[in-house]
Amino acid sequence: MSLYYVQKLMYQLNRDPSVRKRFEAERAALLADYELTAEEHTAVLEGDVGLLYVMGVNGQILMHYAALLGQPWDVYINAMREGVRKHGPVRAGLYSMLKDRHPPSGTTKGRR
Amino acid sequence: MSLVFAGVCSHAPGITGRAARADARVRDAFYAKLDEMRLRLEAAKPDAVIIVAAEHFANFFMNNMPAYCIGMGDHYEGPIEDEQWLGIRHHRVPGNAALSRRIIEGVLPNIDVAYAEEWKFDHGIAVPLHFLTPRYDLPVIPVNVNCQGPPLTPLTRAYEFGRALRRACDAQPERIALVGTGGISHWPATPDSGTINEAWDRQFLERFLANKRDELVAYTDEETLRDAGQGGFEIRTFLTVAGATEGSTGELLFYAPIPIFAVGCTVAQMAVR
């Protein structure tokens, strides 16, 4: 699993307009610069936010990436929920520690 | 001169980006207190404002992640986010490289801080500036405490960093303001976005406003992750402000959970003595 590199690609996409231009103009060549697994490669090509979340991409990187893709807020949040439903708990990274730790009772939940 | 102002506020991107979806009454009360913080900051007549933020992979990544970093540029830019998504226009923001350098040199005897001569702001700094320096005419010195990519700096060190910043500020002729920004409990950028542990937040704020150092540094990251979400790691920015105002207490101007903003929205000022 090359979680590091898929996150690096998104980090650079989020902050660097020249990388964004390559993402639009020559996506396959850009992705070839990163050591991505086949699953990561497909998830990035398809903008599969749910699967990327389950793979363990840090949410702060993924949130900016979803915005870059033009996903409305609710679509983005629901994509992560659907990703967990479809692919199971987060596999790696910070959020894999959260899978058995749902927010404690007494917390406020509302329109996200 | 020295440190002339210290405060904390929330920075969540929803505060500006999803403003239209919040309960208008609570949102406007929050905005009003942010504006009161602006007036108080302006009344302190600072020459520069240090923003202690918990940035979100706009500048720092796991290829070279500093625990602490201070900006040392004459200008910065941001936000990196889409302007419409965040609800904030892109700006070039003034800095003060010479003052940054003196502060960095003042901190280094106590904390091995990194420095950066270029820095792109994300919402972590852009949202506070939008409310606190809306004309972008006050030099900003960005500071980052890594709160996103573990392993993270211990809370004891975040407090000590604040002490070091204070000593460095007090050695300068300029009047310097300090603003810490972060969430308290929240689960941002996850399927649990919008969850807020108000009881935990209020206990933390009580400790923070009373500047109870030993109670502030007592949280373990495991407890914080369980009770306050991964966003709770950003309490480090509050601890840095507490360290910089050690011996002083604070005033809570505003606290209310606003789920669509994904955080318990907070505005507070610490006395500077």
Image: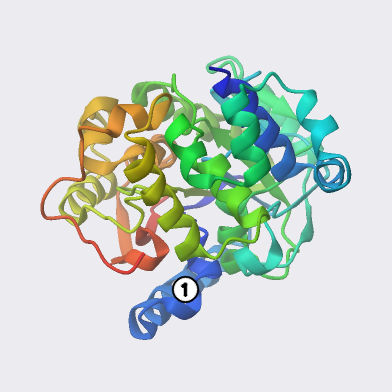
Residue at point 47% right, 45% down? A50
Q: Position of residue B39 (x, y in %)?
A: 53, 72
Seen from the viewer's position, the closer of residues B78 and B202 is: B78
* Left or right, A76 with reference to B108: left
Q: Position of residue B247 (x, y in %)?
A: 32, 39
Seen from the viewer's position, the closer of residues B229 and B131 is: B229
Seen from the viewer's position, the closer of residues B144 and B174 is: B144
Residue at point 11% right, 50% down? A105
How many numbered marks appear? 1
Q: Quadrant of residue B73?
A: top right
Can you see residue B39? yes
Seen from the viewer's position, the closer of residues B14 and B213 is: B14
Q: Residue furthest left?
A: A105
Residue A70, placed above or below residue A105: below
Quadrant where the N terminus of chain B sits is: top right
Residue at point 47% right, 69% down? B34
The residue that disc 1 covers is: B36
Q: Position of residue B186 (x, y in %)?
A: 33, 49
Residue at point 48% right, 49% down? B181
Residue A2, placed above or below residue B175: above
Q: Position of residue A66 (x, y in %)?
A: 59, 52
Q: Amino acid at mark 1?
A: Glu
Residue B152, placed above or below residue B178: above
Q: Secondary structure at mark 1?
A: helix
Can you see residue B66? no
